[in-house]
Amino acid sequence: MSKTRLGYVDFTHVEGFTDYMDITIDCINQLGSQLDVLDVPAGNGLVVDRLNELGHHAIGGDINDARDGFVRVNMEEPFPFDDCTFDVVTCLEGIEHVLDGYRLLSELVRILRPGGTVIISTPNVMNVYSRWYHFLYGYPFQFPPHAMQHVTKERAIDRGHINPMSYLRLRYLLESLGAEVTEIKGDRTKKKHLLPFLLPVFLLGWVMGRKHRCREDGENVHLNKIAKHLSSKPLLLSRSLVLVAKKNKS
């Protein structure tokens, strides 16, 4: 992030390559070569530059005017692209900054070609540390109220972390838009030294929540996939969650 604290600058930038960026680029490379990719919000262009170096056709979208080659994209508004324009769309650490996550996701899916991939990273509010943090403070880790900014139409700036997006909510919204979650990944483990205290609490909750992992009608295949993700290392331990979904071909 910018050295100035989030919430007190017009825009925040990641100054160097992060784990979630590397994970995203690896995912894109596994999908194929010379792919048409949009990265939004593109920040200072680190992901776009790396993808282009690797032979993809990547462009950045943002409102921060950090790069002359960026397309101006406001994540609160319709994107200036036709339907089915890109093979891959990435939204890294962006969705938590907007008022309406569903509207943003609908734009990300709309501009994807059938069978295309959307990759989203966001602060992982479901990791065991954030659950404990929420219990203590009343809000998830990385979403302090003092860092939120109110934005007027006349001044498009960073709102800060205003919109916690859980894995469950992201999955439900993407499925409602015709995109299937295929995998989740995570970056570095948050607060490793606390795991001996936090994991037993999770295990107790997992045992108590068994009744929520089955349906009365017996249609549990979809629910089993969700349960597998809920108990996975990326969701339980990572600071940022990276979610990969494919747009339906029909």
Image: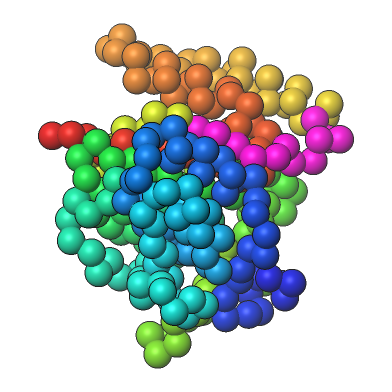
Q: Residue furthest top?
A: 218
**Residue 130 can be seen in this image:** yes
Q: Residue at x 68, y 34 (%)?
A: 237
In the rendering, at what x and y percent does residue 13 appear?
A: 61, 68
Q: Give above or below for 71 relative to 132.
A: below
Q: Residue at x 72, y 37 (%)?
A: 189
Q: Residue at x 58, y 24 (%)?
A: 232
Q: Give above or below for 16 relative to 177.
A: below
Q: Decide whether residue 41 is among the magenta residues.
A: no
Q: Residue at x 17, y 55 (%)?
A: 83
Left or right of 208? Residue 77 is left
In the rendering, at what x and y percent does residue 242 appear?
A: 52, 41
Q: Quadrant of residue 240?
A: top right
Q: Quadrant of residue 114?
A: top left
In the rendering, at what x and y percent does residue 135 appear?
A: 70, 45
Q: Residue furthest right?
A: 193
Left or right of 71? Residue 233 is right
Q: Name the image quarter holding the N terminus.
A: bottom right
Left or right of 91? Residue 196 is right
Closer to the camera, 48 or 19?
48
**Residue 164 can be seen in this image:** no
Q: Decide whether residue 193 is among the magenta residues.
A: yes
Q: Quadrant of residue 143?
A: bottom right
In the rendering, at what x and y percent does residue 210 appear?
A: 52, 15
Closer to the camera, 114 or 179?
114
Closer to the camera, 122 or 25?
25
Q: Give above or below for 37 relative to 221.
A: below
What segment carries the magenta color?
Answer: 184-195
Left or right of 53? Residue 104 is left
